[in-house]
Image (cartoon, coloured by chain):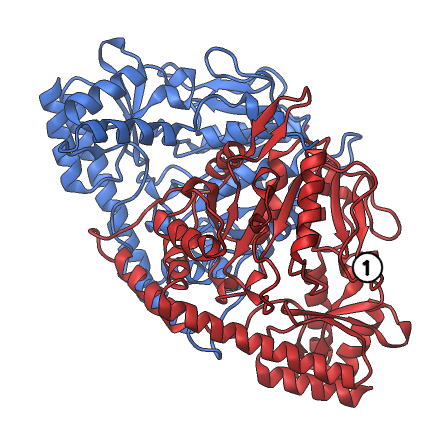
Chain colours: A red, B blue
C-alpha cells in the first residue's frame, strides 16, 4: 500500500498567491467589466532589456544549427554566466568566489524551497514573521515541524516577529535554532539590513554553528550605498551562509527563469555525532541529481544583463519600479496610511486602516477600488493588520490604482 | 548546530554521468589531439526543428514588448501547451485527461526525482536493475533506504533484475512493494513493454494498492504500432499510475528544458491508518511551492512541436536517430557483439566482449577507439558486463565511431 507524505496534510489552506488569484478570478467573473489592477503578486511588467532580447535571439539561432547547438549544459550552469556573476555581483563588492561555489538554477523560489533537503530533519528552523511562505511550507513538507496552530504557525518552527517596535528587523532568538532564513531587502516588509545587523547574525550563527539561508533576491533595489548587497560582505559569512539571488525582479526574468545560489566551500554543517561535513558538495549532489540545468537561452539572457548595455538597461527598469514605489509611498502617506519599505526594496508594507484584518481589507479594496494587494496575514500572524504593495506594476496602472485608492476611502 | 541530511552520505561515489565526464576530460587532457566521439550520455545533437525556432523567436519578441510580455505563468504550465499535449499525445491514443492532470515542468529528470517527495518514507520502493540512477538516488536522499552494499545496491530497495533470461522485462516482485518505477521504452536496455506486460503491472498495482511511476520519456521512439505509448492505454492505470514525458529526446529540448507529468485525479495513496488521499493535489501543492513554472519561451517552443509542421520536423529528427540505431545494431552485430534494444528505443544495450567489466571496457574503448559509451554497471549490478550506446550522436560521428570500434577489436 503506497502511503502519502502525511506532512503535506499539515499544510494550511492554499498557498498565498493561488488563493489571491482565486478570489480575483471569482470577483472578475461576477464583474466582467471591472478593470482590476494588481499591486499584489510581485510580478514584473516591464519588457526585457534590449540587450537581453538580442542575446536570446542569438541563443535561439545557436539551437537552429548543429554546429552551435547546445544540449545538456553542466547542471551547475555555464561558466560564461558564472564568471559574469562573480565578476559583477561579487568582486565589485570585494567578495571572492570560486566558480564551483555558484550554482545556476531556474529560480530562487525553487532554490530556497529545495535547499532544506540537504539538512537533517532534526534542525530547528527559524524564520521571520511575516515570512515568504515557501521557506516554511517546504520545511513542513519535509517533516521539520509539527501541526499548525490556529494562527497558522507550525510547531517546532521558531518565529521571529518583525514589527514596528523592532523596525521589522528580527531580534536574535533566545532559544536554540540551527537554520535561519533571512531575506533582505525583505519580502514582504521592504526592510533592509544594515551592515551591523548582518554582522550580529553572522556572529550568532558562527557561535551556534547555525546556517543562515540568506535570500538576496531584491538586492538590486538597494538605493542607499551604506547597505550591504551580499551577506558575504560581512566577515566570516562564508563559514555560515548560503545566498540566493535571482534575475527575476532585476531584469524581468519571472517568465524566463534564471537564478543562482552561492554555497561557499568553507561552509560546514554537522553529522549528529559532530563531524563537520562540507555543505557545497551536498548541494552539488542534490543539484546534479534532481535538476538538469537551466535553459541555455535563459543563461545566455542572464549573461547579457552584465554587458555594459545590459547593465544600463536593467538599471533603467529598476528605476521605473523604484519610481512607482516613491509614488505609492507619497500617495498613501497623504491618504493617511502608515507606510514602510519602498525605499531600498520594491515592496511597501502598509497598515490597514481602522485596524481591519488583512483579508477583510483585501476583499474591500478589491470590491471598492478593484485594486489587488497582498494581505499581510498571508505572510504570518505578525503580518495581520498590514498589506503588501508591490512596485512592479506599470507606472500608468500604479497611478490609476492610487486614484482608485483615493476615491475609495 | 546545523546538521546535514545524513542520507546523502550513503550515496555511492559520483552520479554516473559526471564520473564519465571526469574520465573523458582526464583522457582528453592527456591526449589533446584525440577526437573523442561520445555514444555515451543520451544528449541530442540534431538542431531544433524550424517550427520550434520560429515559435521561440516569436516568444522572445513577446517579451520585448510590455503589451505581450509574460511574467510568471501558472506553475502548472500554460493551457495552450497542456491542451496541445492532451489533444496530440493522449486523445489520439484514446486516453482522456483533464487540464489539471497535466503538470508542465523543466525536465523529466527533475520530475522523476521530485515525485517521491509526496509519498511517505515508509514506502518500499521497487526499481529495475539496471535502472536510471535518479530514481534510486533521490530515494536514498529522502531516507527510504539503508546503506549501499558492495554491489552498490541499497538496503530496503527492491531490485528487479532485467536480464537476457527475462528479455529485460522485470518479473512481478514476490515481496511487498509500494512504489514501482518502470521505464518503457527502457533506459538503459532499450526494451519495450507490450500491452500485456503493462496490464500485468497495472493489475498488480491495483491489487497491492501500489503506485507505478511510469517514465515514458522515450515513447516517441516506439516504431512498432503494437506497443502502447502511454500506460493510460491500459485499463485501470488511471487509478495507480503517474506518467512522465519529455520534449528532450523527441524535439531536442535537452538545453531548452520542458517536460510534463500526468497525475490522474483518480489516483489515490493512503495515510498510515488507511485513509485514501488524492495524489494529484499533493503534487500540485509540491509543484506550486517548490517550482515556479517552466520558461515561457520553452513552453511556446514545446507547443510548436504539435503543429502540423512541427510534428513532421520532429518525426524527421527521430528518424535520424533511429537510423543511427539501426546502423549501430548492424555494425556491432557484424563485429560479433550481442546487441539488444535500438528498435523501439534510442538506446542499445550491448554485452562487453570477453566478459570484461563495464568500466574496464569503457576505459579500454576510450583509450583505443576514443569512443565514449556508458558502462552498464553504472545502472546497477545486472548492468555489469554490458554497455549502453545512445543513438543521439550525429550520423557522421556514429559512422566514424563504428569505424573506430571495428579497428579496435
Q: Position of residue A217 (x, y in %)?
A: 58, 58
Image position of B378 (left or right of A135): left
Reply above or below: B345 against A315: above
Q: Position of residue A30 (x, y in %)?
A: 73, 78
Closer to the camera in the image, A52 or B393: A52
Q: Position of residue B328 (x, y in %)?
A: 19, 31
Closer to the camera in the image, A110 or A274: A274
Q: Look at 76% across and 34% down and name the residue there.
A: B271
Give the quarter of the figure containing the C terminus of chain A. bottom right
Reply above or below: A224 against B331: below
Image position of B249 (left or right of A131): left
Q: Look at 38% across and 67% down and name the residue there.
A: A52
Q: How many marks?
A: 1
Instruction: Give the class, few, some or many, for how many residues have Cα within 10 Å of label 1's Cα (few <14, many ≥20).
Output: few
Q: Position of residue B256 (x, y in %)?
A: 38, 53
Give the quarter of the figure containing the N terminus of chain A. top right
Question: Quadrant location of residue A189?
Answer: bottom right
Reply above or below: A264 against B69: above
Question: Quadrant location of residue A145?
Answer: top right
Reply above or below: A395 against B13: below
The residue under label 1 is A166
Q: Secondary structure at mark 1?
A: loop
Does residue B246 appear anywhere in the picture?
Answer: yes
Does residue A258 appear anywhere in the picture?
Answer: no
Q: Chain of mark 1?
A: A
Closer to the camera in the image, B45 or B169: B45
Amino acid at each position: 500500500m503506497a502511503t502519502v507524505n502525511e506532512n503535506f496534510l499539515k499544510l494550511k489552506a492554499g498557498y498565498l498567491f493561488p488563493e489571491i488569484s482565486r478570489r480575483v478570478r471569482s470577483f472578475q467573473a461576477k464583474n466582467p467589466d471591472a478593470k482590476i489592477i494588481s499591486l499584489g503578486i510581485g510580478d514584473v511588467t516591464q519588457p526585457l532589456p534590449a540587450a537581453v532580447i538580442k542575446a536570446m535571439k542569438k541563443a535561439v539561432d545557436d539551437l537552429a544549427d548543429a554546429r552551435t547547438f547546445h544540449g545538456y549544459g553542466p547542471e551547475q550552469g555555464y561558466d560564461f554566466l558564472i564568471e559574469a556573476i562573480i565578476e559583477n555581483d561579487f568582486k565589485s563588492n570585494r567578495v571572492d568566489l570560486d566558480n564551483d561555489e555558484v550554482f545556476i538554477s531556474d529560480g530562487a523560489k525553487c532554490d530556497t524551497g529545495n535547499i532544506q533537503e540537504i539538512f537533517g530533519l532534526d534542525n530547528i528552523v527559524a524564520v521571520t514573521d511575516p515570512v515568504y511562505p515557501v521557506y516554511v511550507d517546504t520545511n513542513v513538507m519535509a517533516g521539520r515541524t509539527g501541526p499548525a496552530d490556529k494562527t497558522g504557525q507550525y510547531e517546532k518552527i521558531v518565529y521571529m516577529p518583525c514589527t514596528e517596535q523592532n523596525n521589522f528587523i528580527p531580534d536574535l532568538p533566545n532559544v536554540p535554532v540551527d537554520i535561519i532564513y533571512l531575506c533582505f531587502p525583505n519580502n514582504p516588509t521592504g526592510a533592509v539590513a544594515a551592515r551591523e545587523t548582518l554582522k550580529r547574525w553572522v556572529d550568532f550563527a558562527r557561535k551556534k554553528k547555525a546556517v543562515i539561508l540568506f535570500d538576496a533576491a531584491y538586492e538590486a533595489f538597494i538605493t542607499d550605498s551604506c547597505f550591504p548587497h551580499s551577506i558575504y560582505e560581512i566577515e566570516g559569512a562564508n563559514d555560515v551562509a548560503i545566498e540566493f539571488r535571482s534575475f527575476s525582479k532585476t531584469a524581468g526574468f519571472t517568465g524566463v527563469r534564471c537564478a543562482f545560489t552561492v554555497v561557499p566551500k568553507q561552509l560546514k554543517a554537522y553529522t549528529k555525532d559532530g563531524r563537520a561535513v562540507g555543505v557545497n558538495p551536498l548541494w552539488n549532489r542534490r543539484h546534479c541529481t534532481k535538476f538538469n540545468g537551466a535553459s541555455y537561452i535563459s543563461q545566455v539572457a542572464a549573461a547579457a544583463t552584465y554587458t555594459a548595455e545590459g547593465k544600463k538597461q536593467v538599471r533603467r527598469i529598476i528605476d521605473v519600479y523604484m519610481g512607482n514605489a516613491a509614488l505609492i509611498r507619497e500617495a498613501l502617506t497623504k491618504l493617511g496610511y502608515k507606510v514602510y519599505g519602498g525605499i531600498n526594496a520594491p515592496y511597501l508594507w502598509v497598515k490597514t486602516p481602522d485596524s481591519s484584518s488583512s483579508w477583510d481589507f483585501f476583499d474591500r479594496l478589491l470590491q471598492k477600488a478593484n485594486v489587488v494587494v497582498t494581505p499581510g496575514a498571508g505572510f504570518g500572524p505578525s503580518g495581520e493588520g498590514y498589506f503588501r504593495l508591490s512596485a512592479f506594476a506599470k507606472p500608468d496602472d500604479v497611478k490609476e490604482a492610487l486614484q482608485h485608492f483615493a476615491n475609495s476611502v
